[in-house]
Amino acid sequence: MTARRGRMTVDGEHATIVFERRLEHEIEHVWEAITTPEGMRDWLLCTHAAIEPRVGGHVETVSGPGQYRARGTVLRWEPPRVFEYEWKVDPLPEMPVGQHALLCYELEPRDGATLLTVTYRRITRQTAVGFLPGLHAFLDRLEAQLDRRALPDWHALFATLRTEYREWTG
């Protein structure tokens, strides 16, 4: 599972998380799964998504097991290659200072498949530690959705994956 692991680099109180996944699907299918409400619904546990597909457009999602409400502005919209936006979450008990991070999906075609690189930048260090196994679990669910397999339970995946990330302290 090491090749599928995410990497975290720390810079003071903030961190950057990067995951790379080779998905055996055409780039357009992966793009649709990460940029449309219908595509995001299942793998991201997304109960609400609104995306204005343009630079400067508004993004709002309610997703994940915690049903976090995130909002922001589209910073890069280059179909079907790059989708980057602000990921702002108001303070919550598990995120006491909230978040003002940047989330970027980069897609590169590779012999009928797609190399997906997911990068969270400027996420607080405290949150990043939990997001390593959490995002790993979401990407496993994305891959299952694209493969048209049953989606694994996020909570069970997270419980297993957090033992594989030595950064995890919770």
Image: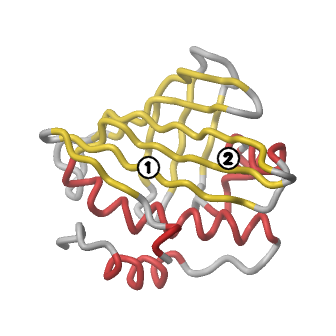
Q: Does residue 11 sit above or below 143 in this rendering?
A: above
Instruction: Identify the secondary structure beneath mark 2.
Output: helix
Tell which of 99 and 161 is nearer to you.
161
Give the CA separation, mark 1 to mark 2: 16 Å
In the picture, which quadrant includes the C terminus?
Answer: bottom left
What residue would you read off at disc 2?
34
What residue is at 40 percent from the left and 62 percent from the top? 66
Tell which of 69 and 99 is nearer to you.
99
**94 left or right of 48?**
left
Q: Does residue 24 sit above or below 71 in this rendering?
A: below
Instruction: Return the residue found at the far front.
Output: 111
Instruction: Identify the secondary structure beneath mark 1.
Output: strand
Residue 51 picture quarter: top right
What residue is at 35 percent from the left and 35 percent from the top? 101
The mark nearer the N terminus, 1 or 2, is 1
- Residue 54 drawn at (x, y percent): 67, 19
* Type of colouring: secondary structure
- Residue 27 drawn at (x, y percent): 80, 45
What residue would you read off at disc 1?
18
What residue is at 41 percent from the left and 43 percent from the top? 120
In this rendering, the label closer to the viewer, 1 or 2 = 1
Instruction: Return the residue found at the far top.
Output: 56
Residue 162 — which label? Answer: none
Residue 11 picture quarter: top left
Q: Does residue 75 sit above or below 7 in this rendering?
A: above
| Kind of residue at badge 2 | Ile
- Residue 24 drawn at (x, y percent): 79, 62
- Residue 88 drawn at (x, y percent): 37, 35
